[in-house]
Amino acid sequence: MAKIEIKNLDVHYGDAHCLKGIDIEIQENKVTALIGPSGCGKTTFLRTLNRMNDISGADVKGEVILDGANIYDGLTDVISLRKRVGMVFQQPNPFPMSIFDNVAYGPKIHGIKDKTELSSIVEDSIKQAALWDDVGDRLNESALKLSGGQQQRLCIARTLAVNPEVVLFDEPCSALDPISTSKIEALIRELKKDYTIIIVTHNMQQAARISDFTAFFLMGVLIEFGETSKIFEKPECEKTEEYITGRFG
């Protein structure tokens, strides 16, 4: 079942045509990996899914339909949209406050004030992010004291705390060591039971390990999309095969 349907999506930044006629369906409770060389439009595409591109003045044409409603129509509440479609960035970006306050920040912004309820949300979110064993006894410490991998899982917990339906990951492991990367990958596989996940990655092995579907972008065009096993074992397009086997990119 499709959670998000993208129809004839075009994105311009000034004279730069970054995405060209993208048509794709993102399946619910699956992991979709976005692959392709640097500058091919992966992150631009990801950011269209919760209108983060609004911030940088992109000109977006086409439709992004989330549960039957186009998020680019004039009625969309962008704050509510970004609650439903959360995003975890490439570099961990914890706020300069306690671990607890980092995770409680979103729920507070959305009106939750009860301390017992906030504590429950914080604990549940940190456990979902597989971080509780590391920080459960020191929630009042500064989040900036955590390791890079712990900070990234904290940012995932912060995203989960507002109860999203879709989680966007923009190269979440690019700044992490192999052990931290393995933990994030295991976490993503677990999270798809409850969330629809879309991840940008330059790591072909990572895409093959954790995703159900893979989309290959090149120069703003969606070259090929399908089940990950098929994309990696028997791609239809020669360009896809050349990229995943390392012959370019």
Image (cartoon, rainbow, N blue to C red):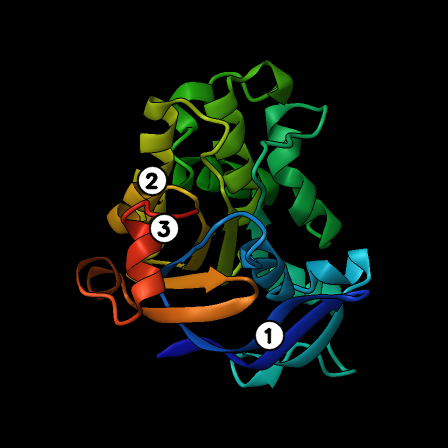
State whether residue 43 is above or below residue 90.
below
Q: For numbered disc 2, what is the local secondary structure?
A: helix
Relative placement, left or right, of 93 versus 109 is left
Q: Position of residue 119 (x, y in %)?
A: 56, 37
Relative placement, left or right, of 46 versus 3 is right
Res 35 visible: yes
- Mark 2 to mark 3: distance in Å? 10 Å
Q: Amino acid at mark 1?
A: Lys
| Viewer-proximal residue among 170 and 146 | 170
In the displayed image of the protein, which residue is found farthest to the left?
233
Mark 1 / mark 3, whichever is N-terminal: 1
State whether residue 246 is above or below residue 20.
above
The residue pinned by badge 2 equals: 185
Q: For numbered disc 3, what is the local secondary structure?
A: helix
| Viewer-proximal residue among 116 and 147 | 147
The residue pinned by badge 3 equals: 191
Residue 99: image tag:
none
Residue mark closest to the camera, 1 vs 2: 1
| Viewer-proximal residue among 96 and 213 | 213
Q: Quadrant of residue 91?
A: top right
- Mark 1 to mark 2: distance in Å? 30 Å
Q: For numbered disc 1, what is the local secondary structure?
A: strand
| Viewer-proximal residue among 69 and 181 | 181
- Mark 3, Cα crowd under 10 Å, few <14 / some 14-19 / many 20+, is some
The residue pinned by badge 1 equals: 20
Relative placement, left or right, of 126 versus 20 is left
